[in-house]
């Protein structure tokens, strides 16, 4: 594999600026890496010709002195983002071979800044899943393996293709989305960095909707600094998205390496869940020690409504999904299964087009919104959501700058190991991440160590609304203390 693919995004941009190599050379190296990584199933659509055309255009702009912040950097795009003229399916059969005639705001901003598209990345169908096993294109394989084993592991979900491709050096960074942990959990499972920004920081326009009040786009990258660089390009006000806030976008990368001395870091007692693996507990304690050494003040805090977050999330998210996915009816676009009348067409199309997990969540959502159950379930879940948000507000009002927790309750597990007989088993993987979405706050997962089987483990930092800057500063401390996570070997090539 080319040494160019092992570069971080920052190192690649520096090399391009120094003319050590061209964007075309950099992109060609990544195109070849993607082609050699079929066993990972991370890319479901490769666009090598488009990538090389974009790279040549980037080289031309750089030669004229018109280079953008991401000029010539090859990225992967999660299949949830609509890309003009390039198939976008949310990894569902119901969208068939849908080719958008428009570009999502987030990807258009990446192209504005000079980035190059390598192709579309695999994901859980409609972003519903925690293991990337619900995709219509089959599961993504984690590039990591257990010590001495060759069992195929999940990279997490729903942004499994994004995390796997970044960890395997197939792209310099990737777009992802997070509704209940779909950026942070895959990042933790693959030794990459993933940030779910504050709700409203990135536009949702052109991103296929799952749960509109929870969905948020963000990057998965090799380092904290790379994530900061990507988030700046992805962020910004968009009048086409009513939930996009018109606030200044800071230079996030400038906060990487900034002193954290004097910051107050909260440790929530409610996150010490029953039967937490010893290695997760140790990792958390190690993170606390690193931050103490860096001059942070560690304080125990309470988020009393945490235990209700997961059940409330699995009422709110399916309710919004059932509403959002009503548009897929076989009439306007995507799959159409003929029926004897319009109702029969709807039923057959949706039955064949949606996968098992998506059908399950649509049914749950329809149930909790139905007459007689709306007040008992949906309204109550929204009230709990308000209390969860208030828990965080109270902690931050007391002077806490960020909260440190584990990112996941375990290391990556095997494909097919969880959720077969009991879907709740899979839902429990989101136990540390859903609160952040329910409260609309920013959260970052950063590699912090390894399990006893040699698999990456991550820690999560949760920040105040629109204070991603502090998260980048604190995450950099953990990254520096833990050391860079490098993939042991490219077994798939």
Image: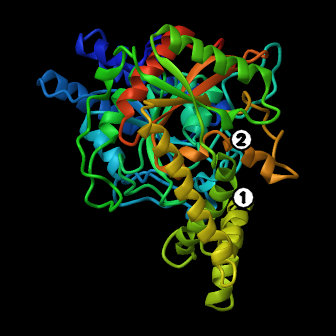
Residue 66 picture location, percent across and down: 14, 28
The residue positioned 60% from the left and 59% from the top of the image is: 384
Q: Nearer the viewer, residue 347 or 195?
A: 195
Q: Report whether 441 appears left or right of 111.
A: right
- Which quarter of the rendered picture does the C terminus lie within? top right
The residue positioned 25% from the left and 35% from the top of the image is: 113
Residue 388 picture location, percent across and down: 56, 51
- Asked which quadrant contains residue 433, the reply is top right
Neighbour tally class for label 2: few under 14, some 14-19, many 20 plus, Cα within 10 Å: many
Position above or below: 252 against 175: above
- Which quarter of the rendered picture does the N terminus lie within? top right
Q: Nearer the viewer, mark 1 or mark 2?
A: 2
Position above or below: 378 against 344: above
**Looking at the image, which residue sits at the far left?**
64
Residue occupied by mark 1: 357
Q: Nearer the viewer, residue 187 or 80?
A: 187
**Looking at the image, which residue sits at the far right?**
421
Q: Report whether 415 appears left or right of 372.
A: right
Q: Quick one: SS at disc 1? A: helix
Q: Nearer the viewer, residue 172 or 297?
A: 297
Tag of residue 488: none
Give the colouring mode of the picture: rainbow
Residue 42 visible in the picture: no
Residue 37 picture location, percent across and down: 61, 27
Q: Nearer the viewer, residue 165 or 426?
A: 426
Residue occupied by mark 2: 429
The residue positioned 58% from the left and 38% from the top of the image is: 161
The residue positioned 52% from the left and 31% from the top of the image is: 403
- Asked which quadrant contains residue 151, the reply is top right
Q: Could you give the CA–CA distance between mark 1 and mark 2, rounded to whole angstroms?
A: 15 Å
**Looking at the image, which residue sits at the far bottom?**
341
User: Do the residues under discs 1 and 2 have CB atoms within 8 angstroms?
Assistant: no
């Amino acid at each position: 594999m080319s040494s160019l693919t092992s570069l971080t995004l920052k190192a690649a941009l520096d090399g391009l600026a120094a003319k050590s190599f061209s964007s075309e050379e950099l992109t060609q190296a990544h195109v070849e890496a993607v082609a050699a990584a079929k066993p990972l199933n991370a890319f479901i659509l490769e666009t090598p010709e488009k990538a090389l055309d974009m790279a040549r255009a980037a080289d031309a702009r750089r030669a004229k002195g018109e280079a953008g912040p991401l000029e010539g950097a090859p990225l992967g795009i999660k299949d949830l983002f609509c890309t003009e003229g390039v198939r976008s399916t949310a990894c569902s059969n119901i969208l068939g071979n849908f080719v958008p005639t428009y570009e999502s705001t987030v990807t258009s901003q990446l192209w504005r800044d000079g980035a190059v598209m390598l192709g579309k990345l695999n994901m859980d169908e409609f972003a519903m899943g925690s293991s990337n096993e619900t995709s219509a294109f089959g599961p993504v394989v984690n590039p990591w393996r257990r010590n001495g084993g060759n069992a195929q592991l999940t990279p997490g979900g729903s942004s499994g293709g994004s995390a796997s491709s970044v960890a395997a050096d197939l792209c310099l960074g990737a777009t992802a989305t997070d509704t209940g942990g779909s950026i942070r959990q895959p990042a933790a499972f693959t030794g990459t960095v993933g940030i779910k920004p504050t709700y409203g920081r990135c536009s949702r326009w052109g991103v296929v909707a799952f749960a509109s009040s929870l969905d948020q786009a963000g990057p998965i990258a090799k380092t904290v600094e790379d994530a900061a660089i990507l988030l700046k390009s992805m962020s910004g006000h968009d009048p086409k998205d009513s939930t996009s806030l018109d606030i200044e976008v800071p230079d996030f990368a400038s906060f990487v390496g900034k002193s954290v001395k004097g910051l107050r870091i909260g440790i929530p007692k409610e996150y010490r869940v029953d039967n937490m693996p010893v290695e997760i507990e140790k990792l958390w304690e190690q993170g606390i020690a690193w931050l103490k050494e860096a001059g942070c003040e560690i304080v125990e805090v309470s988020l009393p409504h945490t235990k209700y977050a997961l059940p409330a999330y699995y009422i709110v998210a399916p309710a919004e999904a059932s509403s959002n996915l009503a548009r897929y009816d076989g009439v306007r676009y995507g799959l159409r299964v003929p029926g004897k009348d319009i109702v029969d067409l709807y039923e057959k199309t949706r039955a064949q087009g949606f996968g098992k997990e998506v059908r399950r969540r649509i049914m749950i959502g329809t149930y909790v919104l139905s007459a007689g159950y709306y007040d008992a379930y949906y309204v109550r879940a929204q009230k709990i959501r308000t209390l969860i948000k208030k828990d965080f507000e109270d902690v931050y009002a007391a002077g806490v700058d960020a909260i440190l927790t584990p990112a996941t309750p375990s290391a990556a597990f095997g494909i097919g190991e969880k959720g077969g007989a009991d879907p709740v088993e899979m839902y429990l993987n989101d136990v540390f991440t859903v609160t952040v979405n329910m409260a609309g706050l920013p959260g970052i997962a950063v590699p912090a160590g390894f399990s006893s089987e040699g698999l990456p483990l991550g820690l999560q930092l949760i920040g105040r609304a629109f204070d991603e800057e502090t998260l980048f500063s604190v995450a950099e401390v953990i990254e520096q203390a833990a050391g860079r996570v490098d993939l042991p070997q490219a077994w798939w090539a």
